[in-house]
Amino acid sequence: MVRLCIAATLAVVISGCGVISRGILYTDTTQPLCKDARGTILGDVASRGSSKRLQIPTTRVDIGAEWDSRAIGDIAREHGMKTVYACDSRRQSVLFGLWRRDEVIVYGE
């Protein structure tokens, strides 16, 4: 019975179902915010805005703080953009997500 449990656990882990999809110490991923960007013009300007988050897990209450804005309209207005064509999302995470930076990259004119 013990061998069967070990074999089943190994099968799940090796098949990819039990694999952690993000980095433990550091993660940096970028992905598009729009579903279908084929043929989309990106424009001449790329502007960035981000929010930061610090989270301290405790035994009873999780303590955390988040600051800054990553709203697409705020980023475009701050950088004088009149037209937004596309956006990307970038996430950086350190130490199991204790510190996280979410960034939106806006392309336009």
Image (cartoon, rainbow, N blue to C red):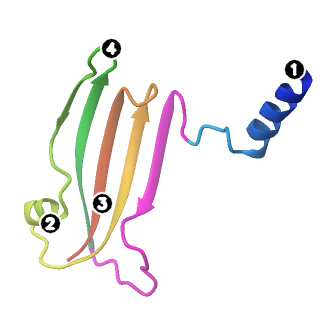
The Cα atoms of the two marked residues, 3 and 2, are separated by: 10 Å
Quadrant, the C terminus: bottom left
Disc on the earlier residue, 1 or 3? 1
Three-letter code, disc 3:
Ile
Q: Which residue matches tag 4?
A: 58
The Cα atoms of the two marked residues, 1 and 4, are separated by: 35 Å
Q: Residue 23 lies in what quarter of the image?
A: top right
- Secondary structure under tag 1 reads helix
Label 1, residues with CA under 10 Å away: few <14, some 14-19, many ≥20? few
Q: Vertical placement of 45 versus 62: above or below?
A: below
The circle drawn on residue 105 is: 3
Q: Is residue 18 left or right of residue 31?
A: right
Q: Which residue matches tag 2?
A: 76
**Magenta span includes 25:** yes
The Cα atoms of the two marked residues, 1 and 3, are separated by: 51 Å
Q: Vertical placement of 49 versus 80: above or below?
A: above
Observer-side mark, 1 or 4, equals 1
Disc on the earlier residue, 2 or 1? 1
Disc on the earlier residue, 4 or 2? 4
**Residue in the image at 47% along x and 49% along y:** 29
Residue 99 in the image, given as x and y percentages of width and height? 34, 29
**Residue in the image at 76% along x and 39% along y:** 12
Which residue range is magenta in the image? Answer: 22-44
Q: Vertical placement of 74 versus 56: above or below?
A: below
Three-letter code, disc 1:
Val
Q: Which residue matches tag 1?
A: 2
